[in-house]
Amino acid sequence: MALVDKAGFPRDKACGDLIGPRGVQLLSDLGVALPASARVGDMVVVGPTGRRVRLPCAPGITYPGYGLSVRRTTFDAAVHDAAVAAGAVAITGRAAAINGDGGVEGVAVDGRELRAHTVIGADGATSAVADAAGLVDRRRALWGFAVRTYLDEHVALPVIAFWEPEPRTALPGYGWLFPTADGGANVGIGVGTLGDRAKGRDAVRLLPAFLDHLRHLGLLARPPQDAPVLGGWLKMGIVGTSPAGRGVLLVGDAAGLVNPLQGEGISQALRSGWAAARAVLDAHAKNGDGVGKKGDAAARYRAWVRAEHLPYHGITAAVQSRLLPHPRAISALGRALTLPLVGRAVAPAWAVFWNELLDGAGHTPGVRTAALVTRAGRAATARADATSWLDHALCASSSLDEVDEAARGVT
């Protein structure tokens, strides 16, 4: 197996650096140890008025009651080294084109061709692999842009902050203040831009004002000092991306597997990478010749994505699409959810639903309410454009144009 990456490790990436409980469980199952990491549990949500709600991080049946904080320079290098130790051959280069019809025959990497039966594209939101395979419609995708910096500040609990740059006009996203494993802080903001990627510059422009806002809330002790800022694109909710076709399976950000409500992506990337590899191995084993029929792995992987993520992303992608153009509605919702009585009442269910932890949650507080919210959300968004598009995209290996037509009821 060739492991092709554009540059060597360690290297940095814009991220909040938190790995959710499902990702922590998979790393444990695979025996991948992470140096320089720290456990994180409950999270504090700060509303536009400064009111605070503590979301509990309860253990489930299939995941632990904590996440991990680890810098991406450390995390990415550890995962890369584990893959190489398991037998992958590391190659530095950029995939430029995928040749072949109905399955991969060759992948052009910096002027040379690698022969491959299947390609797993794990190259981020702006995936060149997705483009080369014709699996993404960038105009339809739900984009976001995030910037972060590191500060020498102690953070007791992870913080999500809903912020109003102007009164009752919320940021179309949120800010965060997360602890780092070395006792510092990872702080940043992410904005949802839907199909208008030009709005991504708002995150960069607004970051200094957001840092001042955190200081006024008492969450930062000192005036922010100049520190390096790093930004990156997110592609959320799967919408606009077919996760598999032509011998190519897309995982993580490349597939749009980022939570549309709170931007988590590491756990989804880990689990989808595992599922894609499992689909390839199972397809080859079924065929009995070590090769497998073209399309088998893609069908298996699409079925996994559909079962694992459609129930949640079908709701939340539709909600994001409807809410983001209305910053005053976002402001009103943030204020309502952080009212003292409301916040305490909804916190257990909020923690489960918002973090996509319902499946395997067991009988922890809030699970029954989160299940009711999920059922109500499915009914409310069943006819939404985003939900319809996802439903068709995860069923078939059709082209994106055919998926669009089917979602509109044309075919």
Image (tube, grey):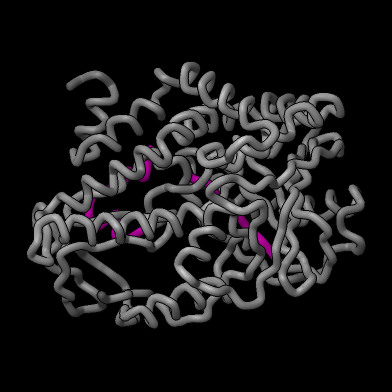
Segment tinted magenta in the rendering? 127-149
Residue under the image location 69 percent in, 56 percent down: 188
Residue 87 falls inside the magenta stretch: no
Q: Position of residue 377 (x, y in %)?
A: 52, 22
Coordinates of residue 68 in the picture (x, y in percent):
64, 62
Look at 58% across and 63% down and name the residue there: 14
Q: Which of 247 and 124 lies nearest the eye of the viewer?
A: 247
Q: Residue at x 52, y 65 (%)?
A: 28
Q: Residue at x 40, y 28 (%)?
A: 387
Q: Is residue 302 left or right of residue 233?
A: left
Which quarter of the figure has residue 72?
A: bottom right
Q: State which quadrant residue 128 falls in.
A: bottom left
User: Which of 56 and 174 lies nearest the eye of the viewer?
Assistant: 56
Figure disc tally: 0
Residue 341 visible at all? yes
Task: Please state the horizontal and vertical placement of residue 155, each as a whole percent of the image.
Answer: 82, 61
Q: Position of residue 48 (x, y in %)?
A: 80, 36
Q: Is residue 91 above or below residue 52?
A: below
129 falls in the magenta region: yes
Instruction: Report if residue 91 is visible in the image.
Output: no
| Residue sitting nearer the eye, 110 or 342 | 342
Q: Quadrant of the C terminus?
A: top left
**Residue 153 relative to residue 354: left or right:** right
- Examine the rendered structure and indicate whether residue 57 appears above or below residue 166: below
Report the quarter where the N terminus lies: bottom left
To which quarter of the image does residue 117 belong? bottom left
